[in-house]
Image (spheres, rainbow, N blue to C red):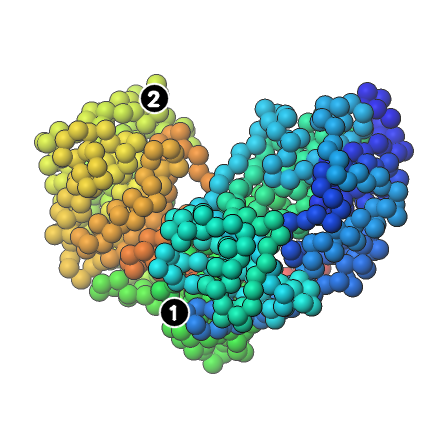
Amino acid sequence: MSAGAMSTGRTPAALRVAVVGGGPGGLYAAALLARQGHAVDVWEKNAPDDTFGFGVVLSDETLGGIEAADAAVYAALSAEFVRWDDIDIVHRGRLLTSGGHGFAALGRRRLLEILHERCAALGVRLRFRTRAPEPEALAAAYDLVVAADGVHSPTREAAAEHYGPTLTGGRCRYIWLAADFPFESFRFEIAETEHGVMQLHAYPYATDSSTVIVEMREEVWRGAGFDLCDEAESAARCAKIFGEALRGRALRGNGSAWTQFRTVVNARWSHGNTVLIGDAAHTAHFSIGSGTKLAVEDALALARAVESEADVPAALAAYEAARRPAVASTQRAAAASMRWFEELAGYVEQPARQFAFNLLTRSLRVTHGNLRLRDPRFTGAVERDFGCPEAPEDGPDGAGTPPMFTPFTLRGLTLRNRVVVSPMDMYAAGAGASAPAGEGVPGDFHLVHLGARALGGAALVMTEMVCVSAEGRITPGCTGLYTAGQAAAWARIADFVHTSAPGTALGVQLGHSGRKGSTRVMWEGMDAPLPEGNWPLMAASALPYRPGISAVPRAMGAADLAAVRAEFAAAAVRAASSGFDLLELHCAHGYLLSGFLSPLTNHRTDAYGGPLENRLRFPLEVFDAVRAVWPADRPMTVRLSATDWAPGGTSPEEAVAIAGAFAAHGADAIDVSTGQVVAEETPEYGRAYQTPYADRIRNALNVPVIAVGAISSWDDVNSLLLAGRADLCALGRPHLYDPHWTLHAAADQSYTGPAAPWPAPYRAGSRKPPTGRG
């Protein structure tokens, strides 16, 4: 039945299906659809035994889906699998092994043979060495067209304006090779050469063969001369570099070439009756073993949708709705893994076990919690290296103190655990029922808000951005430290924290709104100017935050610079007298000091603009002025936006340089945030999405960092700390949801030690209440 016959909205008993591409995803989709009774034709431009790459790794989850959908394919695959549990990591000659991971692999060629046989048995017409007709012709002749034609998909490119593909290249080059012997497990090894760090990923896929992938940064690849090598020479040189891992044996290729990984994302996966699956729709870096897995899972989801939905359009919509969340999650994890390997040179100085733990948890698909279940001996050794205290006598058997409950010292302040309540603007300081009359004065709301979180177990509770002048407020509801009355109100809060939650530190974040000031409170229109009563704005340059909406600030002159420096210093003096334990200078999120740092917001041509050294000048002057009056034994931190999420903004290299400059001037830690510098930003949101920027600064500079940004679980906190990606973790929204987040994290982990003491009046609630029977 042709596509034109589909207008009734009813799926015919049997569809005519065209599959473009004879890789695992296309073949498995063909088999599943043929099994449902549909007539399926497959076009593959290569010969049946042509394949690139060697081994294929499938997860237990994917295998479970295959078993449920087609027992015959599952049985054939199971007979071929090589299985192993261990991951071997070699760090500077030291072998470390982590067990309990569970892998299954087989040769890609054998996988294709099994799928060829299954397709033939089900009546699928396989056309090898034959290019498919043009996409429009296929769409007209068939009811359903499945485009499984790879990362460079001609089908996708023929209608690129509809699918909306984005292809992003990585920073490494890699090559797929094979060794004629089986590794005993997955093996990761690094080689530190005169040209830079190279890495080997290897795993067995047959009783006599292993896949070997060699990867390195582009500049290392060129420096080593691999750009001038053919396949044979590349294989020989890689075998020599990793001779110990290969036991002196050779490597071989199979049409192997050095490749730059490309991440494919599409705005839409279907067009009319044509649908993309596998690499045509999406790719995820090979370091999480996902290419074939994703393609096979696409085939499973597509077949389920075709079987259950009323017509082809509904089936394609259901397929995409079902698969997009899983694919997006995998792509986020793969991007984190890819970035980790791109930044590998920054980790090689880590202690061996921490390096291994960092590698294993690089994408947070594996965390401290599930690695402890998989291999408690290995994880326990990493914890001991980290300095986790022994578990209290009533703690869980075999478990030490969770990493998040180890102390950490900044200058003269020792924090009892690693949890920070992140600064969060409350906009509740205006005159009204919840605040005393008086501009910028914190009232009962702030006492309860900050006091509740102090009672909740976090080691450090941070205020919102406290403004250093009336003109430096974001909104009329922002707090300040520019009057004696404000300082007295803050002293009341600090006294409550220190008296009622002893051991909890209270930190103040000082800032000036710059061009983002004189706006409404968030819930009345974020970043929208006040309807009346606006005050004049100033910034590094006369650039409005939202052109056509926001007021244009004046570019600061010499008198303005001097006045603001003095305002910050005066606020710091009041903060010290109010009893704050730590002071953070807000140089992020597009506020005044951040506006000097970013090239997108600083267009000055004087000594405070242009090259990074000049853009740093005024923020460092303010830092020095504050540090000079802030008590010597109390720490200072600096919050930075490590990227602007916009072209031409702060680069990762500049972020490291900025952090290094503040550290050189005496910053005790860098609080690493991102974005909010320009309105046209395009952030890459996701779980712990800002952590890689903190990680990079920490490992490049060996300076303590506070990680922040969508960190929501105590398992993630433990993982980030133990991997050496952060020293402290700041959580905002989780503490809005649960002021006692830290105490509840302790209870969930059966921790009862000194790092998370329950206030005496609350001790009766230190165990979860019993629930009714289900």
**Image x and y of residue 23, in percent:** 71, 45
The image quadrant of residue 510 is: top left
Question: Closest to the observer: 601 or 53?
Answer: 53
What residue occupies the far bottom of the structure in this picture? Answer: 393
Looking at the rendered structure, the kind of residue marked 1 is Pro
Question: Closest to the observer: 240 or 274?
Answer: 240
| Badge 1 or badge 2: first in the primary sequence | 1
Residue visible at 50% across and 38% down?
A: 168
Calculate the distance from the C-alpha at mark 1 to the C-alpha at mark 2: 49 Å
Mark 1 burial class by Cα count in 10 Å: few <14, some 14-19, many 20+? some
Mark 2 burial class by Cα count in 10 Å: few <14, some 14-19, many 20+? few
Left or right: 728 as drawn, with respect to 335: left
Looking at the rendered structure, the kind of residue marked 2 is Pro
Contact between marks 1 and 2 (CB within 8 A): the answer is no
Q: Mark 2 points at which residue?
A: 547
**Image x and y of residue 169, in percent:** 48, 41
Q: Mark 1 points at which residue?
A: 351
